[in-house]
Image (tube, helix red, strand yellow):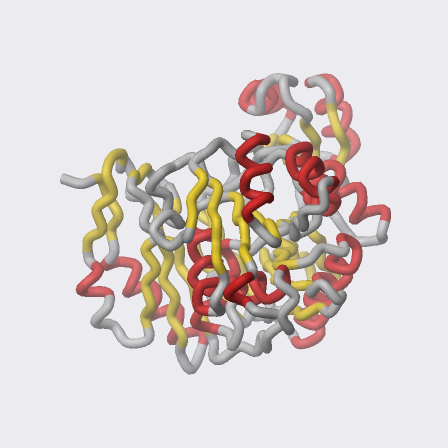
Amino acid sequence: MNCLKKKIGIIGGGQLGKMMILDAKRLGFYVITLDPTLNCPSHSLSDEHIVAAFDDEEAIKKLAEKSDVITYEFEHISVTALEKIERTGHVVYPTVTSLAIIQNKFTQKSLLQDKNILVPEFKKINNEIEIKEIGNRFSYPLMLKSCTGGYDGKGNAVIMDETFIEKAYKELGGGEIPLMVEKFVPFIMEISVLACRGISGDIVVYPVGQNIHVNSILDETIVPAPLSKECTLKAMALAHDVMEIFHGVGMFCVEMFVTSEDEIFVNEVAPRPHNSGHYTIEGCLTSQFEQHIRAITGLPLGDVSLRSPTVMRNLLGEDEADGNTFVSGLEDVLKLPNVKVHIYGKEEVKAKRKMGHLTVCAATVEEARSQAIKAKAFVKIVAEP
């Protein structure tokens, strides 16, 4: 295969698309991005940029005609549009079939449960009365979730007891969108495992990372996760099983709850590179972004070995930030050893918006975490003065 002649179409020009392109260009691929924002993070790196909405079927068709393979950086896109281009012979990875199942949390959980994967108890609901009935059956607290469209805590509401039902139900649209209730899992650790499947069916599974969230947004990923060898192997085997279930091509992330050394629940599956996998850029022999490009273009999958203990910290827009992006502290943070900083290039900053991340590789997890805390204190992403 001549990579210079193979064209990759990416739906979405955010940070994940940008990081895919960095590896795609290094390998010699031509990349076309579809994104409605002219100066999105991917814009300056793309060979072509189709400026159009994600549900613009004509634009997606145009992208398909220009590309040999199409992929995407987030899952909330039109399955109907992708099915149409797939029917006309265009290749989409991960497959449209797997995307259609995964982008709806209810169908995703239903399939996993049918395949004997341990997931939290769940039930689709239509009104507040049904939530109350499930609360009596599951006990409180409960998680109320929108079946589609949620991310970073958006689309989720915690119901501590019966008095929270009305407020949570209204917060999530009051029945205007499909909702489901999930039994709360009292986990001791949140983890994620990245896995990648090639076109030929070969699968690689990355080391297990511990995820720490603040206000439902990922704050820190620690690799390797502080688990026993047995629990680590169990989590990796679980990710492998999930990959086999979806028959997807490309990177997937399987988020899990560890409740004991013997019990791991699958929380959610994402059919794409993932925020918790950013550590792989410096921490692994093959990053999740290079691996995704390898997989969707039919190249051999790369070695996923961990180079050293690694910690990733997200860099969010500061509280009250709203305006043109301004990054301060970069000079100071780059004086620290072993720290790598990634600024995504988003023109507008908002409070809690993901604007970048930093990674620290060190001899021990403790050393990496200490350096990461120090490094994060230097960087502030605010609105331009």
Task: Kindly identify the residue that appears in the image at 49 percent across and 69 percent down.
Answer: 27
For image coordinates 32% across by 70% down, the residue present is 339
> Would you say 63 lies left or right of 257 here?
left
Query: In the picture, residue 348 is in which quadrant?
Result: top left
| Residue 18 x %, y % | 42, 54
Residue 365 coordinates in the image, percent (x, y): 45, 74
Q: Residue at x 63, y 17 (%)?
A: 176
Q: Quick one: quadrant of the N terminus?
A: bottom right
Q: Residue at x 43, y 36 (%)?
A: 51
Q: Quadrant of residue 200?
A: bottom right
Q: Is residue 36 above or below residue 185?
A: above
Query: Which quadrant does the C terminus fall into?
Result: top left
Relative image position of residue 302 (x, y in whole percent): 59, 75
Do we see residue 161 in this rendering?
yes
| Residue 178, picture quadrant | top right
**Residue 47, placed above or below residue 375:** above
Could you tell me if residue 73 is visible in this image?
A: no
**Residue 229 placement (x, y as % from top left):** 67, 76
